[in-house]
Image: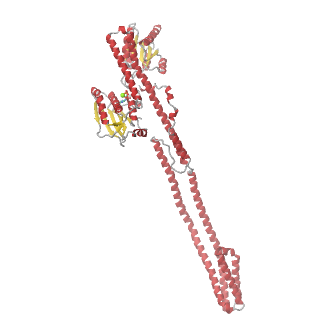
Amino acid sequence: MPDKKSRATGPSLGSVLKSDDLAYPDGKFSAEMDRALRERPSFSIRSRLLLAFTLFFVLTLGITLWTMEILGDVHEKILFLEVADDFKVELQQARRFEKNFLLYGTNLDDARQHAVRAQQLTAKHSGRFLRIIGKDSLVVMNDQLAQYIKLLDAIGHGDRKKYESELRQHGAKMLRLAQDFVEKERKLVQSMLVLARRVPFIFLAALAILMVVVGVFLARQIIGVLTRLMEHTKRFADGDFTPIPPARKFRDEFSKLALMLNHMVRELDRHQRILTESHKLRAIGTLVAGVAHELNNPLNNIMLTASIFKDEYESIDEDERLEMLDDLVEQSERARKIVSNLLDFARQSETSIEPLDIRKILDETVALVGNHIKVKKIKLVLDVSDNLPVVHGDRQLLSQVFMNLIINAMDVLPEKGEIRIATRVDGDGDYLVVDISDNGPGIPEHIMGQIFDPFFTTKPSGKGTGLGLSVSRGIVRKLGGYIEVKSQLGKGTTFSVLLPVTSIPSELSANNSKRGKGTLVD
Amino acid sequence: MEDRLQIMLVDDEEIVGKRLKSSLEKEGYAIEFFLTGSEALKRLDEKHFDIVVTDIRIDEIDGLEILDAVMENSPETKTIMITGYATAEIAREALAKGAFDFIAKPFRPKDLREVIIKAARQIKRD
Ligand SMILES: Nc1ncnc2c1ncn2[C@@H]1O[C@H](COP(=O)(O)OP(=O)(O)O)[C@@H](O)[C@H]1O
Ligand SMILES: [Mg+2]
């Protein structure tokens, strides 16, 4: 039966599918996001890695140069110390001979010779002296040495008494100065060597700390972006197709990924729209074919009956004439019903919205079908809770929805079957749910996707119009709700009508656009 | 065997059967009417019909299936298809399968009568 109907989908309907409708409606917004993603300054992961490695290199280079500098200094100072030692020794020699001269009157020339040699040493290595002890100290030292030689000369020329103590003092001072310098430099060299030995350890420690810091920083950045993108893809999977907005001040390789993801989502959305659209088209096809077929049957009956009534008027008896007239009325009524159902289907825009007492509506609806139920000896259980949340809607249309579902259940139930109507509030309290269950034969999997299509029916013609469920779904959708089906072959079927709980009617439209992609039926 | 033309009529609309049966019987045809395809198929096994008039859409069993059964068991029988809404495709399919002609709903008894007369003439010629 179902595939017979699907033959009706005429190719001419294809023109209804306008390409405009399929364009991504938020295209502008999405393009803006893409531009925002793209227009940030670039700071790629590659350049971040390059920066980190450059930093390490510069640090290593700095430390190496510094160490080389220290070692150069040490080398310089050691060379100086060698000369300074010689210098000191010359001065010590000079002083020893000076003592000899003062005690025994000998060796004055030797003393002078050593002093001059010391003078020659500073002259020869003046550059080195200058660099290490500085100009001032060198001048002082040279002056003292010159003064000492002068004193030696003066004493040699006879004024021994006059210069003796001055010579002694001066010699001691000069020697102390030289010794101090040498000592100081030696200590300096020692401490520099100690430092040079520590540098590698300090360097290693600094490097380790830096590596950990940079590593953690980079990893955190990359993992952070990955987590964020993962959250976005999860959101996409849930049907929220809002593009990924930029979250950082710069762009990198991940931004390209985000752009591609946005692109993918746009395509997904477009395809989904095409699918929905083609589904709608199929429904329109079924509708048109259904109208044609449904109307054709009563029309055919009327045409046959009326023609025969006219052609054979003389030859048929009174009773038969009356029967034919009855048939004419009945078939016209049947056509009228199809048209009015169709109008219901089309009329869904003129709903009046008011706060509803679901309990009352259910009671009234059940009362309306009560008679039929009694005739078929079906048991009807009404299990409605007392304080239901407020929903808004059109009472008559909603009553029609419940009526359609009850009639459908009645149609499939054998004698002594059971219909159960129950109310509940769904998990989050967002929806008031009315469950209408039967213990009938259930709905086979392969027609599940079609039962809501207009004019889809498995009932013999004349009995089912196939409009009940599609009209009901239209009404409930209009109110921001939806209808769910659960069915088990041989066990029964439950249709659940979910109506949004609202305190003000204007919430309806907002609700309407918010929900809906993941439901079974819609 | 009587010499009246034996006609089987299959349609899921009671009124179609009621009206056409009495009207065609007045014309001198022997009519048997069936509401469902399965009943019709059962009867086809038992009896030979000269003409079968069947709706394309009937419940579980398609008019095309009845056509198939007729073509298999008695190909000399003329089958006339009634289509709910004349889709060229199904009509062409039926003709290709060997249907004699088709007629679109809604139709007048006289339209059907003409097709039946055409079929009867063909049968005489065969
Ligand atoms: N409670 C039910 N149990 C089993 N099948 C059902 C039930 N309700 C609906 N259906 C199936 O869905 C089809 C479409 O239902 P509907 O749109 O109300 O049209 P109609 O009742 O006129 O056939 C029915 O023909 C039937 O096959
Ligand atoms: Mg129904």
Quadrant containing the N terminus of chain A in the rendered view: top left
Q: Position of residue A268 (x, y in %)?
A: 50, 38
Q: Is residue A418 visible?
A: no
Q: Position of residue A456 (x, y in %)?
A: 40, 27
Residue A430, quarter of the rendered image: top left
Q: Nearer the viewer, residue B95 or A263?
A: A263
Q: Is residue B110 above or below residue A387?
A: above
Q: Is residue A216 above or below residue A467?
A: below
* In this rendering, position of residue A381 left or right of residue A101: left
Quadrant containing the C terminus of chain A in the rendered view: top left
Residue A350, quarter of the rendered image: top left
Q: Position of residue A53 (x, y in %)?
A: 58, 56
* In this rendering, position of residue A301 left or right of residue A415: right
Q: Nearer the viewer, residue A1 or A452?
A: A452
Display colour scheme: secondary structure
For image coordinates 70% across by 92% down, the residue present is A159
